[in-house]
Image (cartoon, rainbow, N blue to C red):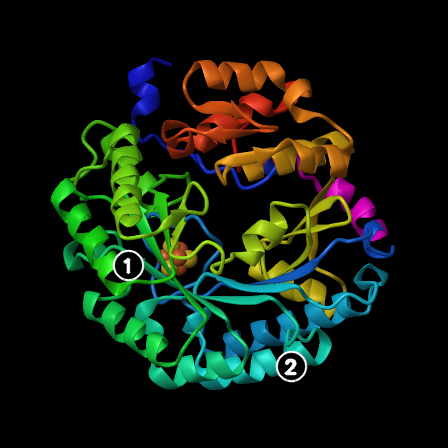
Amino acid sequence: MSEATQEKTGLGNYFIANYPPFSAWKPAHLVEAHAALQQAPRPDTPLGLYLHIPFCRKRCKFCYFRVYTDKNARDVETYAAALVREVELYSKLPIIGGRSLHYVYFGGGTPSYLSAAQLRDLMGRLQAFLPWQQAAEVTFECEPGTLQRHKLEALRELGVTRLSLGVENFNPKLLEYNGRAHLEEEIYRAYGWARELGFNQINIDLIAGMVGETWDNWRRCVAKTIELSPESVTVYQMELPFNTVFSKELRVVGQDEPTDMTIADWPTKRAWVDFAFAEMAKAGYEVSSAYTMVKDKARTKFVYRDSLWHGADMFGCGVASFGHVRGVHVQNLDSWEQYLAALDRGELPLGRALPVAPRQLLIREMILQLKTGRLEAGYFRQKFGVDVLQEYAAGFASLAQAGFLTLADDGVRLTREGLLQVDRLLPTFFEPEFQGTRYT
Ligand code: SF4
């Protein structure tokens, strides 16, 4: 593959969310997952809960998540009952070990697709088994067009501390072309209500490189975001994974003549992220990770991300959800029918798993923490008894030579160039059998 081809926005995932890659996770390993759930937790391991709400008003053309756009109120009720049942099953397992939840994350899909009444009912029933009053953070993802003031009031009362708004772009034409369900004015309306209601932290998600994006429009998007002044801004680079509406369209017309709208290449998307980060830095934001800038780093935490990236346990509830317990990766069954049927039988709906060897747990934390732009060697010495700077000296040296990082006092710091493409660099540290693995 030539350099030029690599730099095109080709099909396939780029974002690295876990290690070892998902393709190594197998149903045959469920035995180890169930064994882990029957044991007490490892010492000093926080516990979190992820809840997948797989409904959306319409499917964005770039979406590769397990979502449904054709479910009715009865389906939503059936799914909510299954989620409650799943949380109930987890709440009775030895792996809980007396822990209360440290963080909760409602992701999707579109959690805000549910009505205020459905949310009150669901969250009340979930908390009967795993309460989150003590949690450091409860995040809730929202699509701006699904929010009303009374729904946000309900979320505030139900303990949501971090509201994440899927804005992605402000331009009505781009939003429509990319299949987003919301309108520009709905962003402002929802944001205004959320501010009035005093949520601790509002995050705005943007995507650099939606189909049809231009420099002029991106500059306006960044300016509008800064004007709103959220505590946190997350900028993703547009991917074109397999199984999206766009990827199918592109396969038909070929990569060089996609559609009437253009798709930016990776260097352009990186330049857009770089621009957004630079503008936000001027406005007083600080780098929190390769994707996120925050207003006040000492106060604006992202507990879900940082817990996961430091090896926390997490129950992943909902169809196709990912979790991690006591050194074992797990993923739920990924079809609606199978997921519901397992819970009907009173079984956890686990679909595949992977016991992670101690060295792999170290690599996992190392590559995930590199996404924050820094690595502290002392943390790894203390937790794993390994000097990562020595152990992975060749990998760090090659990245340093290429200008992607610098070796600092007892750790490494990614350069701006390195942070902008950190996901491309992480395979440097993969074990040989996972080099070149397709990341799905
Ligand atoms: S809102 Fe998110 S989950 Fe729903 S279709 Fe769009 S990208 Fe997918």
Residue at image position (71%, 57%) is 46
Mark 2, secondary structure of its residue = helix
Determine which quarter of the picture holds residue 163: bottom left
Q: Amino acid at mark 1?
A: Arg
Q: Residue 201, relative to residue 198: is it above or below?
A: above
Find out whether residue 341 is within the magenta segment: no
Residue at image position (42%, 72%) is 113
Q: Amino acid at mark 2?
A: Arg
Asked whether residue 243 appears in the rendered view, the answer is yes
Q: Disc 1 beta carbon < 8 A from ligand 1?
A: yes
**Which class describes the residues within 10 Å of circle 2: few (<14), some (14-19), or many (20+)?**
some
CA–CA distance in space, label 1 to label 2: 31 Å
Task: Work out whether residue 399 or residue 387 is closer to the camera in this orientation and state it.
Answer: 387
The residue indicated by pointer 1 is 180
Quadrant position of the N terminus in the picture: top left
Magenta range = 23-35
Find out whether residue 34 is within the magenta segment: yes
